[in-house]
Amino acid sequence: MALPSSNTTTSTPPQAPSVLIRLRSKFASSNLFILFLFTTITLLALPVLTVFSFIFEPANDVWDHLVNTVLSDYLTNSLLLLLGVAAGTLSMGITTAWLTSMYDFPGRRAIEWALLLPLAMPAYIIAYTYTGLLDFAGPVQTYLRDLFGWQYGDYWFPEIRSLFGAICMLSLVLYPYIYLLARSSFLEQSVVTMEAARTLGAGPWKRFFRVALPMARPAIVAGTSLALMETLADYGTVQYFGVSTFTTGIFRTWFGLGDQGAAAQLAAMLLGFVLMLILLERYSRKQAQYHQQSSRYSIHKREVIPGIKGLIASFLSFMPIVLGFLIPFILLAQWALGETINSAFLLLAWNSLTLAFSASLLALTLAIILGYGQRLFPTKTVKAGVRIATLGYAVPGTVIAVGIIIPLAWIDNTIDAWAIETFDIGTGLIFSGSLFILLFAYLVRFLAVALGSVESGLQTIKPSMDDSARSLGFTPFQVLRKVHLPIIRPSLFTALLLVFVDVLKELPATLILRPFNFNTLAVRAYELASDEQLASAAPAAITIVLTGLIPVILLNRSINKSTLDNHQ
Amino acid sequence: MYLDFFMNVAKFFTKAVISTLLLSSTAALAAPEVNLYSARKEALIKPLLDQFTEKTGITVNLVTGKADALLTRLKSEGRNTPADVFLTTDAGRLHRAEEAKVLQPVQSESLSKAIPASYRDPEGYWFGLSLRARPIMYVKGKVDPKTLSTYEALATPEFKGEICIRSSSNIYNQSLVASMIAVDGEANTETWAKGLVGNMARPPKGGDRDQIKAAAAGQCDIAVANTYYFGKMLAGGDASQKAAAEKLAIFWPNQDGRGTHVNISGAGVTTHAKNKDNAIKLIEFLASEDAQAWYSQVNYEYPVREGVEPSKVLAEWGNFKADNLNLSQLGDLNSKAVMLMDRAGWK
């Protein structure tokens, strides 16, 4: 790298101005960038704001009715569900991430990527399979009854379709968020820091709790908030299990009672909830910084766990795979055996793949822009804007879809009316009538996922790194391209992978917003499953899982490889 | 460099997406077509649409989805909506669509002749296409059908702990309760709902099939479910489901009074339909004898059209008297029904 040019050194005043000021003075383009930033944020926030705007519709006496009857149920169930899923995903996600990134034990290599498999399993599908297995009328209980001659009421068996069951199902498919983010954070952590802790006499537990865990906090928080937002947005599982939460309440109020206003007020409460969680976390973090003092100097070496302890480690990290993937997968495969799979499946898979790939790339690009934008202009307005723009993740898909179709169709109709007025040519539904609306919906829903990953990566880079690069004459764009992106490459791949798999599984928005004659695997699986034809749904569900495997394997390799590349 | 690789793949996919887009928009221009928003799932409508295309040469473009969401889409798309026909699986939603002014009245002699007046809108805003009955089902040998009489009687202490029924979030239960409000009044129906909740064998969960399975497994003796789920379990390939369904029999309630609760699936032509003639042709086809027979043979729904031979399974269940309540009332009373069930503690 070139020495600092004399230009830069001589022109530096005694007190170096901040990156922000220099950037503003040197680059007129930064104004354009800010404009772009705000346009993007506004567009992405539009659906959530549309839903919010229904609050002002008169809610009649419905709100009183809700308060008097079901609201307390919604509140308690949602809270318990959140707490349960947080406990479940954190314990599974962190344990497995720590074990696989720091230690070597039998089967570690296979387990490392297999732990991502449950990601490809839609929550409602795993709920259906476990119900089929463990329900009163299912094979397990029937077998027990036949074996011991029991009748209904003679014995106790955990009820799968309950709040506890919903916690288990959601935890099993959502822990990979924490696993992925925590693992890339553990892998990105400087070996030197760990070595220093070791030479200071810290044992493995102490190193974990006092050094690694606090350093991985942004990543773990990002992962947890993704898991919890997805929990709040889940409709399929809780509805099937008969657990009344905010989400089922919103549906019931909107579509059953036909009251948009009251439903939006419920949704606003839900989002208020999410914002509170985010603020709480920010507050508890206060001024703590999470930057690495250095990049890793040496290749990270895993400690080998020998003997029985190693087997215990294997067992511990293998269990989530068995429960979250193997059991439901085998059941689905069994159901799928009796079904025919034809070439129509290829088209479905192709549709799902192209959508997922385009959406994940778009989401990654926007996440980098928003993430870096926040770093360049860390003002309250920008930060608040970005939060609102990513709230779509916590909103149930159907609700966000309605929030999308209303403004987009309005824009389309306005353009159309204007075109007819001016040119006498109708333009029709440019945005809302094409695949554009689907891609937009995916961005609104899943940008939070990509951003969480990108942000937690960027946070580990010291701002002084930006300053040094800038003082070497790099433009902000060059800093991003040549300094940041290479360092946080694992986080970028993580972002891609997460959005990809999420889009593959996405259902409610796809269902409502897709163009004519356009189906995806998730749509096919859902249509059959919701008609209680689990067996017919199995081939599509299996294909989702198998298609999801491809990027899981590919990207996992890339993450591993790029972590190595980085430090060689 | 991985990013380069991804950029290349990205370009490839972008091209693919754009060409798919262009293809889908241009291919449809030439041939005669009709565009359908359907709340009926693809598997339960596509075969009929294919028959229609074969017969008339008119291509049918289809989007399926939840009725309320499709209705919102229809409303917000306004005069630019591509949809010509809106098809739902319950009368309440058709009524809501009519009220939202997204449907237009249609005069068709063949439709008026084929469909009895009680199953279509008097002004022709919508037409019923199939009947979905929601009777009582009981475990043979455990329940004497003589003890069964009406929906109302299910709330009597006699049936304590014996009833399986799904959640009140489901439209079928909402319609059933709405139909009871129309006849018995709100206060009586609320008392009834409280009694029913007290008689439930377990908190409501799962779908209609689950209620039948639970009854077969011994968790309860009586289930309330739509007939087509029952029919599909009996006829489907799954041996355990078949065995479960065979343990139950159908009881048609309220035969001495208003009749068993039925809902319809039906369709209407949208206000801004661009292919209005084709839209009417499609609805006429769906009400034709062949199509009506298909509903009863494939999906175990009852034909709306008189004189259509019901399938063998349906014939075995016997004839019944259906509630002839004006179906638009189900839509009007829906929110009352939901609130009532909330108050009664029906989850």
Image (tube, rainbow, N blue to C red):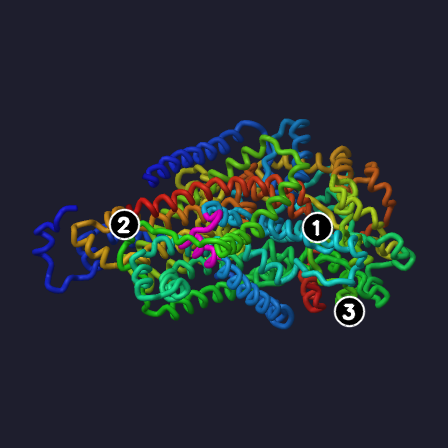
- Name, please, the residue furthest toward the right: B146
Mark 3 or 1: the one toward you: 3
Q: Chain of mark 1?
A: B
Q: Which residue is mark 3?
A: B191
Of B324 and A518, which appears nearest the observer? A518
Above or below A343: residue A561: below
Q: Secondary structure at mark 1?
A: helix
- Amino acid residing under circle 2: Leu
Above or below A285: residue B44: above
Q: Secondary structure at mark 3?
A: helix
Q: CA distance from mark 3 to mark 2?
A: 67 Å
Mark 1 or 2: the one toward you: 2
Q: CA distance from mark 3 to mark 1?
A: 26 Å
- Residue A506 is situated, as x and y percent measured from the top left of the image, at 52, 48
- Amino acid residing under circle 3: Thr
Q: Secondary structure at mark 2?
A: helix
Q: Chain of mark 2?
A: A
User: Which region of the structure is painted magenta?
Assistant: A93-108
Mark number displayed over residue A480: 2
Q: Which residue is mark 1?
A: B91
Of A528 and B25, which appears nearest the observer? A528
Q: Is residue B330 left or right of residue A7?
A: right
Name which residue lies at 48% across and 31% down: B23
Of B32 and A463, which appears nearest the observer? A463
Tell me which label, 3 or 1, sits earlier in the chain.
Answer: 1
- Residue A390 is situated, as x and y percent measured from the top left of the image, at 42, 56
- The reply to whether residue B9 is in sight is yes
Q: Is residue B194 left or right of residue A90?
A: right
Q: Is there a contact, CB below 8 Å, between mark 3 and mark 2?
A: no
Name which residue lies at 35% across and 38% down: B7
- Residue B36 is situated, as x and y percent measured from the top left of the image, at 61, 39
Q: Tell me the crowding category of disc 3: few under 14, some 14 to 19, or many 20 or more residues within 10 angstroms, Cα based.
A: few
